[in-house]
Amino acid sequence: MANSTAGRLKTANTTPEVNAMSVVAPALGWLIPGAGNIIQRRWIRGLLLLVSITSLFVLGVMMQGRIYRPNGGDILDMLGFIGDIGGGGLYFLARAMDWGRGAIHLATADYGTKFIIVAGLLNVISAVDAHHIAIGKKQ
Amino acid sequence: MILALQLSHFSAAAIFAFFFSIVFGITQRNNPQEMLRYGAYCFAMAVGGLFAAGWLMWFLHH
């Protein structure tokens, strides 16, 4: 399974090309979802990533999901924070606006918390994708 | 204060599947045709799994 995935991602260019874009694209992609692809002229992919990740994050907040703080004290809170921080700018915006206090009496709030964490993790995947495009590992 | 939203378990899972399938399709495949196919596959598997798990829980309950 892993081999077939690696095989599909393999392109003609086998030697990774490290340049400024290979650092800027993932950093920008982390801060603004999809921006790593947009800056490399992958407009449609970038916009789809932006809309998908932002929608998941915003829906999570609207479902009264919880935004984890860095000093949760509990190991699961720390893992939740690691997932949330993957959202980059969305996380900082939510903290600045004081969103995501969480409503433990609602089942949907728990779904919302998971939406926010997964949005962060997907954003990390899209930032790594932007890096792969920058080094020529992916078209 | 942001607008509050309450979704059913099914709608929440379907929306979740829709958006993560888009991201997986784009990031895990190399050309647009494969991306579309893989995204559709992920979505179908997620929604199919949702129905399968739903029926399994129904049979376990009855």
Image (tube, coloured by chain):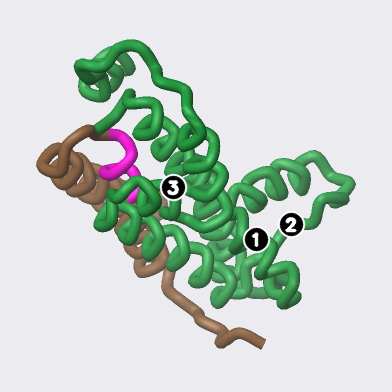
Chain colours: A green, B brown
**The numbered mark 1 sits on a residue in which chain?**
A
Amino acid type of the residue that numbered disc 3 sits on in the rendered structure: Gly
**Callout 1: SS:** helix
Are the residues tagged 1 and 2 within 8 Å (C-beta)?
Answer: no
Q: Nearer the viewer, residue A105 or A114?
A: A114
| Residue A104 in view here | no
Tell me the distance, in whole angstroms, between the alpha carbons under discs 1 and 2: 9 Å
Magenta residues span B23-28
Report the residue that reaches farthest toward the left: B33
**Nearer to us: label 1 or label 2:** 1
Does the magenta run of residues contain A123? no
Does the magenta run of residues contain B24? yes
Residue at 52% x, 64% y: name it. Answer: A57
Q: Going from the N terminus, do you reach mark 1 or mark 2 first?
A: 2
Name the residue that disc number 1 marks. A91
Answer yes or no: are tags 1 and 2 on the same subunit.
yes
Query: If the image is split into quadrants, where does the N terminus of chain B sit?
Result: bottom right
Tell me the distance, in whole angstroms, between the alpha carbons under discs 2 and 3: 25 Å
**The numbered mark 3 sits on a residue in which chain?**
A
Q: Nearer the viewer, residue B36 or B42?
A: B36
Query: If the image is split into quadrants, where does the C terminus of chain B sit?
Result: bottom left
Q: Residues within 10 Å of mark 3 (few under 14, many from 20)?
A: many
In the figure, is residue B52 to the left or right of A21? left
Amino acid type of the residue that numbered disc 1 sits on in the rendered structure: Tyr
Residue at 47% x, 23% y: name it. Answer: A18
Residue at 16% x, 47% y: name it. Answer: B36
Amino acid type of the residue that numbered disc 2 sits on in the rendered structure: Tyr
Give the answer, above or below, for where B29 lies relative to B39: above
Q: Taken as a whole, is the magenta stretch helix, strand or loop?
A: helix
Q: Which mark is residue A36?
A: 3
| Residue A27 in view here | yes
**The numbered mark 2 sits on a residue in which chain?**
A
